[in-house]
């Protein structure tokens, strides 16, 4: 009991020593969470990779909410996606090429790049065996450990030259789908007693198709194109999101690629960052069971108000999938995903659920404004639809966050390359202000 009691005493002390009055942040002009008082992010760096736009700053310094925009290397993602949807083709490889190189590939360059991706999808035999040994663990942790293990197979793991960084980036983008698919198949075998199938990547398939092929073999072309769209939409979101910033902070120290990317995975694993779509699915299932008439606006509004008042569901006062740190009027990713989600719901004969989800989105936004007041503008975000889309494709919740990582590895590696090739680079080291008064040391015998 001595150990347990000591741990208890130490944890009780932490409750006091870790308490910092929120008003002190205002007093000392400290940007809590690296956010300005108006909610905008504190500028800590420059980038040419991604741009997230949700407001514009007026001449008087105030912010004006505008429809959300997302840009990859200066290209509007909405324009990219609409071309992909119109042509019914896969685009994740094209976006990866754009992110890494800064320019759109021509047909030959895209073909060669896709071949290079396939050539690097296979895993080392030892990595496969280690994934088997890690059965039952969280798949994000398996992904992180597998990335760290790649260091041992790399002939130049610590070389941060542009050529080597590009090689490492392509290998990581290629191997993430294989690691996640293998890890889940082993998880379902060890946890649910299902047959274990390890399928090797197919050279004639895109990344999205290959992932579905390795994971479950049977899928429709619309399943694959929808997954590809999700990968495109989640590939990058500016340097200020938590996991990308983590990659840039660690990269600024000069550490190796694998350590930096593993840090990004650890950041994304947090429920406040990468796990929100699981919470939306759970909430949606709860509402399906507790709303008796899926078309009754009054019943839906009443239930949402009870949720906001912390009376029902999980009593947090949150409506998951509503609100974003940057987007105010609209999240362009959610609007684009909804386009193909409607088509997928029709194929899966789930139009009634999709219509219910659309109505929930509409009423949640209205109830949020009624509850909070019209000063705070919010929109639904991509998580509001992504979980339901994953479910329609037939993907299990255990890989929702790993799939996010499978997409975001493109942005992480692009930002790492930029961070390490910036001519005036400096190690990122923010400051914290100490608000504790100086203490006088007391010898042990006098305490």
Image: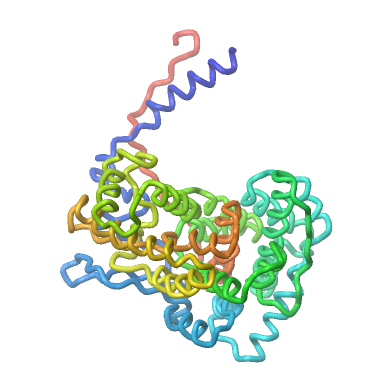
Res. 124 visible in picture: yes
Q: Along the line of sight, which residue is nearer the eye, 347 or 100?
A: 347
Residue occupying the far left of the picture? 60
Residue occupying the far right of the picture? 125
The percent position of residue 142, horizontal first and vertical second, equals: 68, 50
Q: Along the line of sight, which residue is nearer the eye, 146 or 23?
A: 146
What residue is shown at x 51% (from left), y 68% (from top)? 349
The percent position of residue 170, horizontal first and vertical second, equals: 67, 71
The percent position of residue 263, horizontal first and vertical second, equals: 58, 53
**Looking at the figure, which quarter contains the C terminus?**
top left
**Looking at the figure, which quarter contains the N terminus?**
top right
Count how many numbered circles sit on residues in the image: 0
Q: Along the line of sight, which residue is nearer the eye, 81 or 101?
A: 81
Q: Is residue 111 toward the left or the right of residue 355 in the image?
A: right
Q: Is residue 349 toward the left or the right of residue 311 in the image?
A: right
Q: Is 296 placed above or below 193 here? A: below
The percent position of residue 236, horizontal first and vertical second, equals: 50, 68
Q: Is 435 placed above or below 72 here? A: above
Q: How is the image coloured?
A: rainbow
Res. 41 visible in picture: no
Residue occupying the far bottom of the picture? 107
Can you tell which quarter of the image residue 76 is in?
bottom left
What residue is shown at x 28% (from left), y 67% (from top)? 329
What residue is shown at x 61% (from left), y 77% (from top)? 93
Q: Along the line of sight, which residue is nearer the eye, 108 or 194?
A: 194
């Amino acid at each position: 009991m001595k150990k347990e009691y000591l741990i208890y005493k130490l944890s009780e002390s932490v409750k006091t020593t870790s308490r910092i009055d929120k008003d002190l942040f205002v007093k000392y002009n400290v940007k809590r969470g690296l956010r300005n008082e108006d909610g905008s992010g504190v500028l800590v760096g420059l980038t040419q990779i991604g741009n997230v736009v949700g407001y514009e700053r007026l001449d008087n310094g105030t912010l004006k909410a505008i429809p959300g925009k997302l840009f990859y290397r200066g290209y509007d993602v909405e324009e990219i996606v609409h071309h992909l949807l119109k042509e019914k083709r896969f685009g994740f490889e094209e976006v990866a090429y754009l992110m890494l190189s800064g320019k759109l590939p021509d047909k030959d360059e895209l073909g060669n790049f896709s071949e290079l991706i396939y050539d690097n999808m296979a895993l080392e035999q030892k990595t496969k065996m280690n994934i088997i040994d890690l059965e039952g663990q969280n798949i994000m942790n398996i992904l992180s450990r597998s990335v760290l293990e790649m260091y041992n197979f790399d002939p130049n793991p610590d070389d941060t030259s542009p050529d080597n960084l590009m090689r490492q980036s392509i290998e990581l983008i290629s191997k993430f789908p294989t690691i996640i698919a293998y890890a889940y198949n082993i998880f379902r075998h060890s946890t649910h007693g299902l047959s274990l199938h390890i399928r090797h990547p197919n050279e004639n398939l895109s990344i999205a198709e290959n992932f579905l092929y390795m994971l479950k073999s049977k899928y429709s072309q619309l399943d694959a194109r929808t997954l590809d769209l999700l990968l495109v939409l989640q590939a990058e979101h500016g340097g200020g999101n938590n996991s990308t910033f983590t990659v840039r902070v660690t990269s600024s120290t000069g550490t190796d690629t694998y350590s930096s990317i593993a840090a990004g995975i650890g950041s994304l694993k947090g429920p406040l960052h990468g796990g929100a779509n699981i919470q939306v699915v759970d909430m949606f299932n709860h509402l399906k069971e507790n709303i008796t008439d899926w078309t009754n606006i009054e019943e839906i509004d009443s239930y949402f108000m009870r949720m906001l008042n912390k009376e029902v569901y999980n009593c947090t006062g949150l409506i998951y999938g509503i609100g974003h740190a940057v987007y105010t009027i609209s999240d362009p990713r959610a609007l684009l995903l909804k386009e193909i989600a409607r088509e997928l719901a029709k194929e899966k004969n789930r139009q009634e659920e999709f219509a219910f989800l659309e109505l929930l989105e509409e009423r949640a936004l209205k109830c949020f404004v009624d509850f909070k007041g019209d000063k705070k503008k919010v929109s639904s975000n991509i998580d509001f639809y992504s979980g339901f889309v994953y479910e329609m494709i037939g993907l299990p919740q255990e890989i929702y966050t790993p799939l996010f990582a499978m997409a975001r590895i493109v942005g992480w590696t692009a930002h790492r390359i930029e961070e390490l090739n910036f001519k005036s680079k400096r190690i990122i080291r923010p400051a914290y202000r100490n608000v504790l008064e100086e203490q006088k040391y007391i010898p042990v015998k006098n305490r």
